Amino acid sequence: MLLKRWWHKRRRASVPADSSGPRITFFGGKGGVGKTTCAAAYALRLANNGQRTLLVSTDPAHSLGDLLQVALGSKVQRISEGLDALELDPEKALKRYLDEVKTNLRQLASPELRQAAEHQAELAGLSPGATEAALFDEIVRLILDSEDYEQLVFDTAPTGHTLHLLALPEIMGAWTEGLLARGQKSEVEWMQRAPEADDRSRRAGAILQRRRERFAAARERLLDPARTRFVPILNPDALSREETARMLITLGERGIPLDTLVINRVLPDSADGQFLARRRQTEAGHLAAIDRDFAHLKRLRIPLAESEIRGLSALQSLARQLAL
Ligand SMILES: Nc1ncnc2c1ncn2[C@@H]1O[C@H](COP(=O)(O)OP(=O)(O)OP(=O)(O)O)[C@@H](O)[C@H]1O
Ligand SMILES: [Mg+2]
């Protein structure tokens, strides 16, 4: 009975109830289209509206700190009233994950197997995809454990598409088993190969079950349109249109909610001169194609700013325009 009560309490602590937790917005798109700038401006907009907001960069090539003109790291930092930010550090994420695996192994593997199991965990850390997978772990943590915030805004990496990987059940499965590497012994196996396997495998089972539940809860939140949305950004040019079309197919296949497309860096009417007039002509063709190809989405045009966007006050004007 006591054990049952403890287990329920633990479950409540590790997997937050459905209705709780922040709203989540991901900004994604081709390299250089304005993901970081728009994510930061939108987060600022939310904070201006009185919402406690956490802005997160998942891009290993961090430029959020440069944009905000503060030194950001993997610890939450106050940017302005109601706005905090952090940059996820892939190396630190990997170390944290491996440390967790090792702690589990220390508790669960038999003394004879412990060293070999730890070695295996080290190898897993070197395998392709390990860093990205460790980043998933951090994102899941943020999605589930950011109860202090009403809004989470993610600036994503250009090609990683972390979000749709997260929404893939098979990736979740692989990660749940503790490894992405091909053909390597899984953490589970190591745990279960121990002598006195009964008690250990029960504990290993409980750890894995908890992880499975957390991934399932994160996935549910990600796929819930009432809570999460992905905002694709593009520029009015051919390459970014093509990449966006491909990205939208993938996101659609994963069932990731999206309703608005941001068309960033549109030449403003005030831009004059012959050179810009010619550019505007080319651009008009792309804008028409975007309206046609992405007619099922709302489309928000953001003009190319006259001067460089850097620092909070420069972001304010963009924040006012990002009515998403
Ligand atoms: N509306 C805009 N007006 C003027 N400049 C802009 C606008 N949006 C973005 N920029 C500028 O374009 C450049 C690229 O923007 P940003 O870094 O936000 O793109 P990104 O998509 O995050 O790039 P990456 O793929 O490298 O992460 C920056 O110099 C930024 O200041
Ligand atoms: Mg960026």
Image (spheres, rainbow, N blue to C red):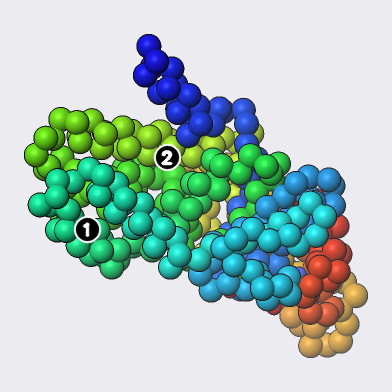
Q: Which residue is mark 2?
A: 215
Q: Is residue 194 left or right of residue 275?
A: left
Q: Where residue 158 sits in the image (x, y, percent)? A: 53, 67
Q: Where residue 164 sits in the image (x, y, percent)? A: 46, 50
Q: Which residue is mark 1?
A: 118
Front residue of this view, candidates 252 and 79: 79
The amino acid type of the residue labelled 1 equals: Glu
Q: Farthest residue to the right: give it.
A: 270
Q: Where residue 133 sits in the image (x, y, percent)? A: 38, 56
Front residue of this view, candidates 185 and 25: 185
Can residue 267 be seen by looking at this rendering? Answer: no
Residue at screen point 56% across, 28% down: 18
* In the rendered image, the vertical position of residue 307 relative to residue 219, given as above or below: below
For mark 2, give the secondary structure: helix
Q: Is residue 65 left or right of residue 163?
A: right
Q: Is residue 116 left or right of residue 133?
A: left
For mark 1, give the secondary structure: helix
Residue at screen point 63% across, 39% down: 147
